[in-house]
Amino acid sequence: MACSISSNAFRCYTETLRLTPRQQQCGRVKPTPSSFLSFNSSTILTLGASPSPVPRRSITVRAKMAASEGSISGSNRMLVFVPPHPLIKHWISVLRNDQTPCPIFRSAIAELGRLLMYEASREWLPTVVGEIMSPMGVASVEFIDPREPIAVVPILRAGLALAEHASTVLPANKIYHLGISRDEETLLPSVYLNKLPDEFPENSRVFLVDPMLATGGTIIAAMDLLKERGLSVQQIKVICAVAAPPALSKLNEKYPGLHVYTGIIDPEVNEKGFIIPGLGDAGDRSFGT
């Protein structure tokens, strides 16, 4: 399946291709439940929702279907996963509805976060194998390795709601709070709370949680802080409810190889920095203030 994101449209076509090295040709792949979008490092994005006499360029992303994330984990391109799960589509629809009351909105975004973290943890968490005694006999078992650190970093305040059910999905995780606000005029980020460790433990795996990837300023600032504390892009996965091309383009340019999991990709960001159609201010709608 090939997808194209332009300033006012997001279109997908039916053919599914596997991108191979340039020396080889493209070959077909049998579709499977795990779908993702890959951004080439040469991708160029030009925004502009209003009509303009200057021809508008668009970015083209090629979507592939993979049996598992492990089959493409060595790629140096940023990968954007949009899991095709009906429950994810359901909760996104609930969140979009401007009639959804605050308690239902918060519950819905928490459920969405649970599903996205479940998808993001597939084939990423280290395990240990052994044997235990069940009531009926000896059984071979596989547990998440408790020696390998797992952390969740929600970006306040809306990230708290999206990460609310993290502990029900991820065993023995730690939560580090990161507060970043965005100036309403300049749209520039400002860090007001930083509870990150001076350095993350070796082999840490970190879920960076921010509901809205709009202009990209906040998520880039958070990624910079994680990198300063010893993490590589292979140790980080970004979890968001809605993503837009400006943020994805910036992430791809600065952090190739990063994996982003989102409920949906919307086509544009308005002059105030809000995703269109989006779901409004996720923090305000989660907490009612």
Image (cartoon, rainbow, N blue to C red):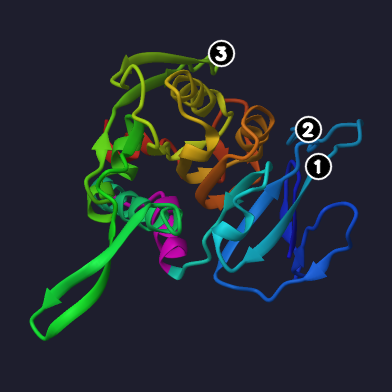
Q: Earlier in the sequence, mark 3 or mark 2?
A: 2
Relative to 188, say whether 264 is above or below: below
| Residue at figure coordinates x 29%, y 41% from the top left | 161
Q: Is residue 70 magenta?
A: no
Q: Is residue 207 left or right of residue 50?
A: left
Residue 278 visible to an observer of this rendering: no
- Residue 226 % position (x, y): 44, 25
Residue that carries the numbered disc 2 in the rendered image: 46
Relative to 197, say whether 128 is above or below: below
Q: What secondary structure do most residues of the magenta stretch adopt?
A: helix
- Residue 69 % position (x, y): 55, 58
Distance, label 3 to label 1, CA atoms, is 25 Å
In the foreground, 174 or 192 = 174
In the foreground, 216 or 75 = 75
Q: Earlier in the sequence, mark 3 or mark 1?
A: 1
Is the C-beta separation of discs 2 and 1 under 8 Å?
yes
Viewport quadrant of the N terminus: bottom right
Name the amino acid, label 2. Answer: Thr
Name the amino acid, label 3. Answer: Thr
| Residue at figure coordinates x 25%, y 37% from the top left | 174
Residue 17 visible to an observer of this rendering: yes
Which element is circle 1 on?
A: loop
Which segment is the magenta one?
Answer: 87-101
Classed neighbour count for the residue bearing mark 1: other residues with Cα under 10 Å, few (<14), some (14–19), many (≥20) = some
Classed neighbour count for the residue bearing mark 2: other residues with Cα under 10 Å, few (<14), some (14–19), many (≥20) = some
Q: Quadrant of residue 17?
A: bottom right
Q: Is residue 135 left or right of residue 26?
A: left
Viewport quadrant of the C terminus: top left
Name the amino acid, label 1. Answer: Ser
Residue that carries the numbered disc 3 in the rendered image: 186
